[in-house]
Image (cartoon, rainbow, N blue to C red):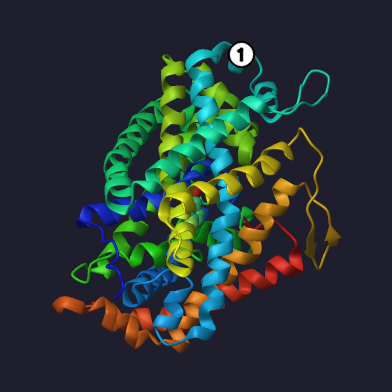
Amino acid sequence: MEKERAQWSSRLGFILAAAGSAVGLGNIWKFPGKAFEGGGAAFLLIYLLVVPLVGMPAMLSELAIGRAGRANVVDVFGKLGHKKFAWVGWVGWTVAFIITCYYGHVGGWVLRYVAAYAFQSKEVYADPAGFFYGVLGLHAADGTTFLPWVTLAFAAVFMAACAVIIIRGVESGIERFNKIGMPALFILLLILLVRAVTLPGAADGLRYMFSMDWSKVNGQTFLIALSQAFYSLSLGMAIMITYGSYVPKTENIERNTVLVCLMDTMVAFIAGFIVIPAVFATLGPEGVGKGGGFAFVSLAGVFEQMPGGVVFGVLFYLLLLFAALTSTISLIEGIVVFMTERFGWKRTPTTIVTCTVMFLIGCLYTCSQAAVDIKGIWFDVVHGVSYPALCDAMEFLTDRLMIPLGALGCCLFAGWVWKPENVIAEAEQDGIRFKLAGVFRFLIRFVAPAAIIVILIVSLFTGTTLS
Ligand code: PFF
């Protein structure tokens, strides 16, 4: 007889865990820069279309698949009678594994910045870019490189913290942690929002965020919004299927999906309305950088010019740390539960070994930023074969290829193989009525797969940034 699977002990526990997974570095670190590049309000509007039309049906399907099959991301397809679709689970599991390798390290950088603002704010302010390079193993002054041991140590601490939470189990670990971390995150965000929009000069940034600059919008903008939504909602991976498998049958997964998507989108938008006005206020529009530089370099100017900036700096990175932790533990949970169920391994040693391996691979990611010259490989039709830095190659592989592939597999499975009727029946357990069943059926069969196929093709043929 199969051992009974864990379950979330309360509705709040599940919603917070799913929202905790969704709300992460993607919302706060990636989203504002994309909103800026995509023409402010125009991008926000597109994103607001993409989330309900593609993200919501995909998330609902993943939760329904997980809850109906009550198994890990690979075996769940067999349990539902379609073993052939186990490849979707393998893709999801592999994506989760690769993402965790680097996500855990970026979490370490964030922890490093909590310490930096607490103890070395003068050094950060003196040369924000130089400090960031130093974190990654490059002396900005003379261009010499070194192995960033301190940063690696911070990443080790971050991964170890995640492992401890995972080992404590779904209910006492993840759920309890999220109950504290998620509300704290919302409160911190609101404080920073008030601070950012009242900075002198912030009005220009607000004006930008509220103006529809359609000249910056093209086909790519839609695709960027789509892939950002998948990443941000933790779709196409082992996550929502695994978390769905812990949801009691009495839960209304339709309503929960809507709530999680709303929370995730709200956090992304609030982050956009913190970061863009704040950077305009201190650095002007040129200050809006991208990626790591954005979260770690540009904001230094913001905090420096804020009264009590060091406190806000520490708060901001603590907030990012919470967000990164809850997302990382969701990734690890999906990875570990597959191994324990599939191979009968024990949770604790499996977690320790997997986290160690992922941390070690992640060291290559961090070191390949600046300290060490390690290349990966990538292909697109425009540029042919290229050899980007390993860190970029890892992100390309997941964001541009495997996430859309995994999400497409899930949508095709739900829409055409397992059939929307089964998703609807799963959502309608315990006397619950699925209000938008007709709309869902149309979206999951036609709109969502078509949109994802376009992403995959365009990313292959244009070679532009989709992540
Ligand atoms: N959704 C997270 C974010 O926006 O940062 C990242 C993430 C977490 C992606 C978990 C995928 C995942 F499975």
* For residue 363, side relative to residue 183 (left or right): right
Residue bearing mark 1? 123
- Identify the image quadrant of the N terminus: bottom left
Answer with left or right where residue 382 lies relative to residue 365: right
At 54% from the left and 74% from the top, the residue drawn is: 88
Q: Residue at x 46, y 60 (%)?
A: 345
- The answer, for residue 45, to whether it is visible in the render is no
Q: Nearer the viewer, residue 31 or 97?
A: 97
166 or 311, nearer to the observer: 166
The picture quadrant where one finds residue 427 is bottom left
Specify whether residue 13 is in view.
yes
Q: Is residue 208 above or below residue 241?
A: above
For the C terminus, give its image quadrant.
bottom right
Measured from the top left, where is residue 409 in percent x and y? Answer: 53, 77
Q: Residues within 10 Å of mark 1 (few under 14, many from 20)?
A: few
Dot 1 falls on a residue whose secondary structure is helix
Q: Nearer the viewer, residue 38 or 161?
A: 161
Q: Where residue 131 sits: x, y (%)? A: 66, 22
Residue 434 at x, y percent in the picture: 24, 77
| Residue drawn at x 57%, y 56% as measured from the top left | 97
Q: Taking 415 as reference, is 175 left or right?
A: left
**Residue type, label 1:** Glu
| Rendered position, 244 above or below 274 | below
Q: Position of residue 386 (x, y in %)?
A: 84, 57
Q: Which of 101/267 is in front?
A: 101
